[in-house]
């Protein structure tokens, strides 16, 4: 059974030199083009079985974050299609989607509503979310008074406590202080070991990738260039792209 299927996914962004060029293009009577096309992803096809843990490797600008955003439906492909089965929780830009004018509890319920989780179910989870995030003294305060570290802890806690069927993670295990990072890594290991959860994981830490994932793919300039066993792919990536841990 497949949790995720991508078929010929292509994403093209229109790049304008000036903001007003977009309006000029929109209203030009002859349809004159004022933009350049940037192909962020080109003809990406792969399938992910339920319970697989897949690392997505690639240098900056390879298209990794764009791919994750398409799978999590933050954005949509220009061509091709994506099918997903199951509740998706995405750890992309950790604090995206928060309303800074309301408190943590209201934001937690709001996040749940976006995922289609009923308020009754979120009420059962809320104590666990707050405890893990270590924000019990601040839950009635609007998020605009939170530090960036507190916001990151809250976002990580919410996204991982709700028990998603598909977890999408974009280089987030560096959040918070050292103790919280260790706690977060422990939780991620538990989720990676859960055969009911499918995980897509972007990281530049090859050692962590080898420990957590069983499969890896490499993106290069928006194209999928390699897909296979995690150790084989990581070794190829290190050799081909001169990767170092420094």
Image: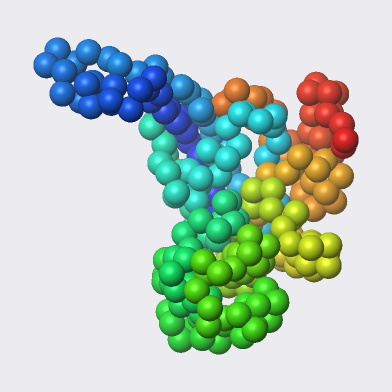
Of all residues, the one furthest to the front in this rendering is 145
Where is residue 242 drawn, in percent x and y? 83, 23
Quarter occupied by the C terminus? top right
Q: Quadrant of residue 229?
A: top right
Residue at 35% in and 18% down: 35
Out of 19 and 186, give the one closest to the viewer. Answer: 19
Q: Quadrant of the N terminus?
A: bottom right
Outermost residue on the left side: it is: 29
Q: Eyeballing the image, is 10 above or below 116?
A: above
Residue 178 is left or right of residue 2, and the answer is: right
Vertical arrangement, residue 12 with respect to residue 181, above or below: above
Closest to the observer, 192 or 106: 106
How far from the left and from the top, in percent, is residue 42?
51, 25
Along the line of sight, which residue is nearer the eye, 48 or 62? Answer: 62
Instruction: Give the percent coordinates (x, y) of residue 148.
Output: 63, 60
- Vertical arrangement, residue 236 with respect to residue 93, above or below: above
Q: Residue 161 appears in which quarter of the rendering?
A: bottom right
Picture quadrant where residue 240 is located: top right
Residue 143 relative to residue 197: left or right: left
- For the point 75% across and 54% down, the residue is 174
């Amino acid at each position: 059974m497949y949790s995720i299927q991508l078929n010929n996914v292509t994403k093209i962004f229109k790049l304008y030199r000036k903001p007003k060029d977009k309006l000029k293009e929109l209203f030009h009577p002859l349809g004159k083009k004022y933009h350049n096309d940037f192909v962020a992803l080109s003809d990406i096809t792969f399938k992910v079985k339920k319970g697989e843990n897949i690392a997505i490797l690639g240098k900056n600008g390879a298209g990794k974050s764009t791919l994750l955003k398409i799978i999590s439906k933050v954005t949509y492909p220009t061509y091709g299609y994506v099918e997903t089965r199951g509740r998706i929780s995405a750890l992309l830009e950790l604090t995206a989607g928060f309303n800074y004018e309301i408190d943590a509890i209201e934001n937690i319920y709001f996040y749940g509503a976006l995922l289609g989780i009923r308020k009754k179910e979120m009420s059962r989870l809320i104590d666990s979310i707050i405890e893990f995030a270590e924000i019990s003294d601040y839950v009635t305060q609007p998020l605009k008074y939170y530090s960036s570290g507190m916001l990151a802890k809250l976002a990580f806690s919410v996204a991982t406590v709700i028990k998603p069927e598909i977890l999408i993670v974009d280089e987030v295990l560096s959040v918070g202080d050292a103790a919280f990072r260790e706690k977060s890594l422990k939780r991620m290991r538990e989720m990676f070991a859960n055969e009911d959860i499918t995980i897509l994981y972007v990281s530049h830490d090859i050692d962590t990738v080898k420990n957590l994932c069983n499969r890896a793919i490499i993106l290069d300039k928006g194209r999928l260039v390699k897909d296979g066993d995690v150790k084989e792919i990581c070794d190829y990536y290190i050799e081909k792209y001169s990767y170092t841990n420094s």
